[in-house]
Image (cartoon, helix red, strand yellow):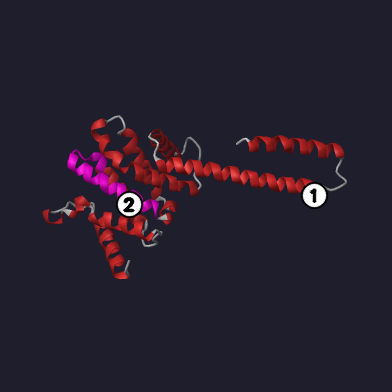
Amino acid sequence: MKDGAKKQVFADFFHFIENFSEKPSESSRYIVHGAPVHALSACLGILKTSMPEIDSKTLIFAIALVQKLRNSKDEMIRDRYTEILSETLSIISRSEQLYTCQDMDIVITELHRLFISETDNRNHHHHLHKSEPSLALLLSGLVNYEMPETETSPKSQAVWELYHLLLRKRHWALVHHTVTAFGTGVELLQNGMKRINEGLSELRSDESEEFQKSLLNQFSCLEDLVSHL
């Protein structure tokens, strides 16, 4: 993609998100349709890379978008906002630098309020299924970042409930990352076992024979367990 075209896509996107909260006029119907968001999402899909130009303004926009979607009563507007939300989550999932921003916590809790609180509301929730694949991509990106795992953490609780919602619906992105993470964990464990074995073979000769036998026996049991994973 040529630099001039890319700059224009970014310029249109930032103009859009910075003016999103303003009441759109009849001459600016693109605000409802969200063309700049769709364009940037497609651009990132082509470039297959994270863009440092995308900053926390995108997260602030996502928060405002979720709140408008949750409060809107107009079915057509809700449908349009859901499509924009889907593309916005896709943009965030491709922008690694956003995962470390403080506003990401608010995005997660707002998404939780939107998806979990409206799950039982069929009249509203039928719109949201369009953005669930992008939500899955966003959540799968969290695996690379540390997060408090206490029950008192609103973010952790929101993430786990959203995970459960999507896993119940068998979204491929989360299933894929779950299987991949498990496979990686087993591989790391096997590599660790190999290193332990190498260390055992280098035990000093002054270690007692009884101690060595006990240690080797425990290692053998552990090795059997790993081999059955």
Hey, which quadrant is residue 5 in on the image? Answer: bottom left
Instruction: Identify which amino acid the numbered label 1 is placed on.
Output: Glu
Q: Residue at x 35, y 53 (%)?
A: 91
Up-down relation of residue 190 to residue 37 (above or below): above
Image coordinates of residue 24 in percent, x first then y, are 16, 52
Hey, which quadrant is residue 216 in on the image? Answer: top right
Image coordinates of residue 36 in percent, x first then y, are 25, 57
Please state the extent of the stretch shown in magenta in the rendering. Answer: 69-94
Identify the mark at residue 60; answer none if there is no mark: 2
Q: Residue at x 50, y 37 (%)?
A: 150
> Looking at the rendering, in which quadrant would you find the C terminus?
top right
- Name the residue carrying label 1: 202
Question: Is residue 76 highlighted in magenta?
Answer: yes
Name of the residue lying farthest toward the left? 26
> Looking at the rendering, in which quadrant would you find the N terminus?
bottom left
Name which of mark 2 and mark 1 comes first in the sequence. 2
Image coordinates of residue 113 in percent, x first then y, are 33, 37
Q: Residues within 10 Å of mark 1 (few under 14, many from 20)?
A: few
Q: Circle 1 sits in a helix, a strand or a loop, which is it?
A: loop
Q: Residue at x 59, y 42 (%)?
A: 186
Disc 2 + disc 1, Cβ < 8 Å: no
Name of the residue lying farthest toward the top? 120
